[in-house]
Image (cartoon, rainbow, N blue to C red):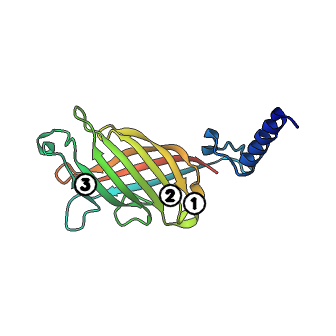
Amino acid sequence: MGKLGVVTLLLSFLIVTMAALGGSQPEDWHKSVVRVEKEEEKVTELHFYFHDTVSGKQPSAVRVAQAMESEKSPTLFGVVMMADDPLTEGPEPTSKVVGRAQGLYGSAGQEEFGLIMAMNYGFTDSIYNGSSLCILGRNSALHPIREMPIVGGTGLFQRARGIAVGQTYWFDETTGDAIVEYNVTAFHY
């Protein structure tokens, strides 16, 4: 066997060894998977009320941060609230609780009052107990009707997407407390 044969044999051995050891290639960081859905996509429509209480001895939403100039801003720009608000079957505060809205909302508008919402609507009633929907988007709270995107979910709402339509049912201008009616359409598997 000549020099060329030995070099070819060594290169072949090296290539086979690297392949067997799973040589690191730039493409190793990803993998494409073709998914075949066995279940059909479902559509669920929900109707409930969101009770946001910022006043009193036991508020359900509290201020956790603010910019230094927030108090001077007519839109409270820079104020961030942490919420654990009840979601109820009807508008009355004594109505049956069907879940909790937990997360953050903050005043994100300098010119117009608008909230950025990052909320998890966790349900505690009926077949939805333990399931949740994730809302992430702008809430133009002073508009009569506003839409916020559903960007995910858990439990029965796995891989959810959809829309949460809010409409103020009641608002106290003195305290800032509010009750918001929600009609939600969620697409999920």
Spot occupied by residue 12 in the image (x, y as percentages of width and height) = 79, 40
- The residue that mark 2 highlights is 132
Q: Is residue 113 above or below residue 157?
A: above
Amino acid type at image mark 1:
Gly
The reply to whether residue 185 is visible in this rendering is yes
Question: In terms of depth relative to the viewer, which is nearer, 86 or 170?
Answer: 86
Gap in Å between the C-alphas at discs 1 and 2?
7 Å
Q: Secondary structure at mark 1?
A: helix
Spot occupied by residue 93 in the image (x, y as percentages of width and height) = 34, 63
**Residue located at (36% from left, 56% from top):** 103
Q: Residue furthest front?
A: 2
**Residue located at (58% from left, 50% from top):** 159
Q: Is residue 179 left or right of residue 31?
A: left
Q: Which mark is residue 155?
A: 1
Q: Is residue 61 above or below residue 94?
A: above
The mark that comes first in sequence, 2 or 3, is: 2
Q: Is residue 37 left or right of residue 174?
A: right
Amino acid type at image mark 2:
Ser
User: Which quarter of the figure has residue 157?
Assistant: bottom right
Q: What quarter of the picture does the N terminus occupy?
A: top right
Amino acid type at image mark 3:
Asp
Mark 2 crowdedness (10 Å alpha carbons): few <14, some 14-19, many ≥20: many
- The residue that mark 3 highlights is 177
Q: Are marks 1 and 2 in contact (CB under 8 Å)?
A: yes
Q: Secondary structure at mark 3?
A: loop
